[in-house]
Image (cartoon, rainbow, N blue to C red):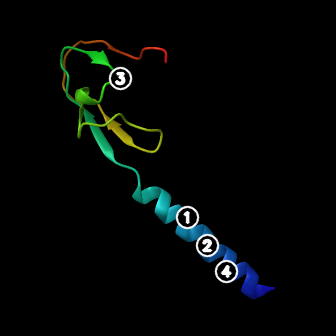
């Protein structure tokens, strides 16, 4: 029984590490505002997913919107 628990714990740990490895830090670059879902507004040029860290760091007032898909 202990062997099964140890194996299950190892598998869960590997899944957690794999999930964390796929997250990225993505920074908003369009200081005119724009569509959240447009990869050109981000660095690197990709739309963030729910596992990514998003930074909007340029000070100013601009609107970021998301079109319904």
Question: What is the CA distance from the residue labelled 4 to the residue labelled 1?
Answer: 12 Å
Q: CA distance from mark 4 to mark 3?
A: 41 Å
Q: Is 43 on the left-hand or right-hand side of 19?
A: left
Q: Is residue 4 above or below residue 20?
A: below
Q: Residue furthest right?
A: 1
Identify the residue at horizontal 73%, vertical 87% (top origin). Answer: 3
**Distance Cα–Cα, label 2 vs label 4:** 6 Å
* Quadrant of residue 1 within the rendered picture: bottom right
Position of 21 relative to 57 (above/below): below
Q: Nearer the viewer, residue 68 or 33?
A: 68
Provide residue 41's location: percent of width, then percent of height: 24, 26
Labels 3 and 2 touching (C-beta < 8 A):
no
Query: Where is mark 1, residue-wise?
Result: 15
Marks 1 and 2 in Cβ contact (< 8 Å)? yes
Residue found at x 19% / y 14%: 32
Q: Label 1: few (<14), some or many (≥20) within 10 Å?
A: few
**Residue behind mark 3:** 36
Residue 46 shown left or right of residue 31 in the figure: right
Q: Measure the alpha-carbon separation of dots 3 and 1.
A: 29 Å
Q: Which residue is mark 4?
A: 7
């Amino acid at each position: 029984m202990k062997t099964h628990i140890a194996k299950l714990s190892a598998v869960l740990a590997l899944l957690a590490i794999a999930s964390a490895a796929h997250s990225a830090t993505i920074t908003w670059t369009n200081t005119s505002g724009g569509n959240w879902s447009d990869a050109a507004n981000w660095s690197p040029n990709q739309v963030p997913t729910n596992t990514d860290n998003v930074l909007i760091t340029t000070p100013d007032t601009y609107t970021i919107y998301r079109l319904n898909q």
